[in-house]
Image (cartoon, coloured by chain):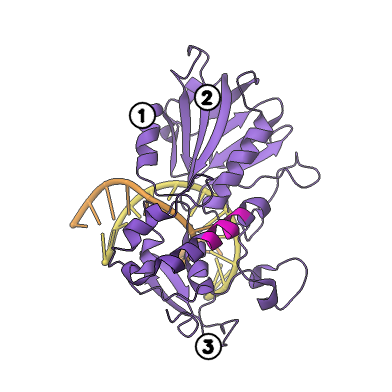
Chain colours: A purple, B orange, C yellow
Amino acid sequence: MSGQSNLDGPGAAEPHRPPEDVLPEGHTIHRLARDLKATLGAGPNSETVHATALQERFSAGIARIDGARLLRTDAWGKHFFAAFRPKDAPAGTAGIAWLHVHLGLYGTFVVGRGEPPEPKGELRLRLQSSRGWADLRGATACELLDDAERNAVLARLGQDPLRKDADPLRPWSKIRRSKVALGALLMQQDVVAGIGNVYRAEILFRHGLDPFRPGRELSQERWLDLWNDLVVLMRSGVRSGRIVTTRPADRPRRGRVLRDDAFYVYRRAGLPCRICGAPVQTVVMAGRNLYWCAKDQPD
DNA sequence: TCTGCATGAAAAA
DNA sequence: TTTTCCTGCAGAG
């Protein structure tokens, strides 16, 4: 759970509980970038933002963006960036300070309008304007970067299906030569940025692909099919704030998708496959639990 | 109350 | 490949 916003519901100023089924992968971070900008306000003439680092150990230098103007927000894969112009910085692009956040496994960045709730628990960073607030907890990375340092982070990342200018042939040039299993390749952020353990399992199922098959045995046509599907699924994830990969025809109930119906194989070890009824398999691959159906993923 | 596990990734070995 | 780190929750007892 993380990167949620409560912009959609009524009473948005109230502290809210995140939906149980929010699983932060790349879509969460893109949604966060959008919500944070909309909530705090961003641009060259926007009001300044109050930044409070409540765990200085993880937030060295954050004081520099206290009273700074938020210019814009951005996401690449699972990395969140916010551009600030500090009070003492000259006009132009020089002196821009980038807040870089990576939520890791436990991080949450909760955004809300109106007055923020009383800070409690392990609050790491709070951003606040007259319009709203954003509270960060538990993130792996929370730091200020200059342009060069930000570029170094971006240089380590592969193409992000959620970015309009993403080129699927760039990851393909790695995959087509790789002996590494497809299920491991998809988790490598320098191949495709933003896929996490849920999208990995689900996209392989949707395309009938054997997670153990080496990348180089995949055809370009099937790779592009997979990529295009990823774009659709992840964009839907940004809109709804949750991951749903099952097709309506494969769900037992109509209406709002229940958590139990949202996935084909993720966390369904031992349960019957929605298509063939065979038990869903699980094994640790690339350090994470992989789920798949041996019968429906033969290729 | 205690334990283990979870959406991640860097460091250590 | 294994360990480590950050937090919150569910399930066991």
**Image position, residue A201 (x, y; %):** 48, 69
Looking at the picture, which amino acid does disc 3 mark? Answer: Ala
**How far apart in space, not on screen, are marks 1 and 2 (Cα)?**
15 Å
Q: Find disc 3 in the rendering and name its residue.
A: A278
Q: Which numbered disc, 2 or 3, marks the residue that appears first in the sequence?
A: 2
| Residue drawn at point x = 40 percent, y = 27 percent | A147
| Classed neighbour count for the residue bearing mark 3: other residues with Cα under 10 Å, few (<14), some (14–19), many (≥20) | some
| Residue drawn at point x = 51 percent, y = 73 percent | A205
* Residue nearest the observer in this picture, A267 or A60: A267
Quadrant of the rendering where the N terminus of chain A is positioned: bottom right
Q: Which residues are magenta?
A: A228-235
The answer to if A115 sits in the magenta stretch is no
Quarter-wise, where is residue A67 in the image?
Answer: top right
Image side of residue C11 versus residue A239, left or right? left
Chain of the residue under the numbered disc 2 shown in the image: A
Q: Label 3 near label 2: C-beta < 8 Å?
A: no
Q: Label 1 near label 3: C-beta < 8 Å?
A: no
Quarter-wise, where is residue A206 in the image?
Answer: bottom right
Secondary structure under tag 2 reads strand
What is the magenta segment's predominant secondary structure?
A: helix
Q: Find disc 1 in the rendering and name its residue.
A: A148
Q: Residue furthest right?
A: A10
Quadrant of the rendering where the C terminus of chain A is positioned: bottom left
Q: Find disc 2 in the rendering and name its residue.
A: A84
Relative to A280, is A59 above or below?
above
**How far apart in space, not on screen, are marks 2 and 3 (Cα)?**
52 Å
* Residue nearest the observer in this picture, A207 or A143: A207
Q: Which numbered disc, 3 or 1, marks the residue that appears first in the sequence?
A: 1
Q: Which numbered disc, 1 or 2, marks the residue that appears first in the sequence?
A: 2
